[in-house]
Image (tube, helix red, strand yellow):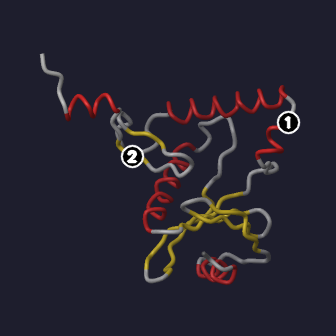
């Protein structure tokens, strides 16, 4: 979606000096670029993704050092125009480590897989139990995979009870 030239222009407008720039990958909602080998910049693909990035920045800043694992820190943020729309973006320090594809991950020894599962479980527990990260009531809200957007939800049972009450 974004060319390297466009990304460089977005960053220069934010006064970020660019020595090197590489495409890292993309998801459904955003694209990631590696700047100067140590900064990851996330750019949204659409308006809703831009709003979700604002929430993600708020969550990351709110969590700060409250977790026992490293998470991206917001080094800088900004806005840019793309196809007539204003979008939000941010840059964070690249976390140490190596990316693994599914095959590589599954080939890891069982003790390492177990340790990774424990780290992820602890992270998710701490993330979902942390209070006052966002100025909202957490009851009824759920974090959606990876993009930290919050959505109201009802269970099927709750929806059924409201829409078709049981008659006695």
Q: Position of residue 132 (x, y in %)?
A: 43, 38
Q: Position of residue 6 (x, y in %)?
A: 63, 82
Secondary structure of residue under mark 2 = strand
Task: State how far apart marks 1 and 2 are (Cα).
Answer: 35 Å
Q: Nearer the viewer, mark 1 or mark 2?
A: 1
Secondary structure of residue under mark 1 = loop
Name the foreground residue: 56 vs 105: 105
Position of the N terminus, as image quadrant, is: bottom right
Vertical comparison of 143 with 128: above or below:
below
Q: Residues within 10 Å of mark 1 (few under 14, many from 20)?
A: few
- Identify which residue is drawn at 48% across, 69% down: 46
Name the foreground residue: 117 vs 168: 168
Q: Is residue 70 left or right of residue 159?
A: right
Q: Is residue 131 left or right of residue 122?
A: left
Q: Residues within 10 Å of mark 2 (few under 14, many from 20)?
A: few
Label total for image: 2
Q: Position of residue 163 (x, y in %)?
A: 20, 35
Q: Residue 151: which disc?
A: 2
Name the foreground residue: 57 vs 165: 165
Question: Furthest-left residue in view?
Answer: 168
Q: Position of residue 92 (x, y in %)?
A: 66, 59
- Identify which residue is drawn at 78% across, 70% down: 36
Q: Is residue 129 left or right of residue 96?
A: left
**Which callout, 1 or 2, points at the residue further toward the start of the chain?**
1
Q: Residue 108: which disc?
A: 1
Question: Furthest-top residue in view?
Answer: 168
Splitting the image into 4 quarters, where does residue 27 fall? bottom right
Query: Do the numbered discs 1 and 2 sit on residues whose CB atoms are within 8 Å?
Result: no
- Identify which residue is drawn at 62% across, 41% down: 65
Splitting the image into 4 quarters, where does residue 117 fall? top right
Q: Residue 48: which disc?
A: none
Position of the C terminus, as image quadrant, is: top left
């Amino acid at each position: 979606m974004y060319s390297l030239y466009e990304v460089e222009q977005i960053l220069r407008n934010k006064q970020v000096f660019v020595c090197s720039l590489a495409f890292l990958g993309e998801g459904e909602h955003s694209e990631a670029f590696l700047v100067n080998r140590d900064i990851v910049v996330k750019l949204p693909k659409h308006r809703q993704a831009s709003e979700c990035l604002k929430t993600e920045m708020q969550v990351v800043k709110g969590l700060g050092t409250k977790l026992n694992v490293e998470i991206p820190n917001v080094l800088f943020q900004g806005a840019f125009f793309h196809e007539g729309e204003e979008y939000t973006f941010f840059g964070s320090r690249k976390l140490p480590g190596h990316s693994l594809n599914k095959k590589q991950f599954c080939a890891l020894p069982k003790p390492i897989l177990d340790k990774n599962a424990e780290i992820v479980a602890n992270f998710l527990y701490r993330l979902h139990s942390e209070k006052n990260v966002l100025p909202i009531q957490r009851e009824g809200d759920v974090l959606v995979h990876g993009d930290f957007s919050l959505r109201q939800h009802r269970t099927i049972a709750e929806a059924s009870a409201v829409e078709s009450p049981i008659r006695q």
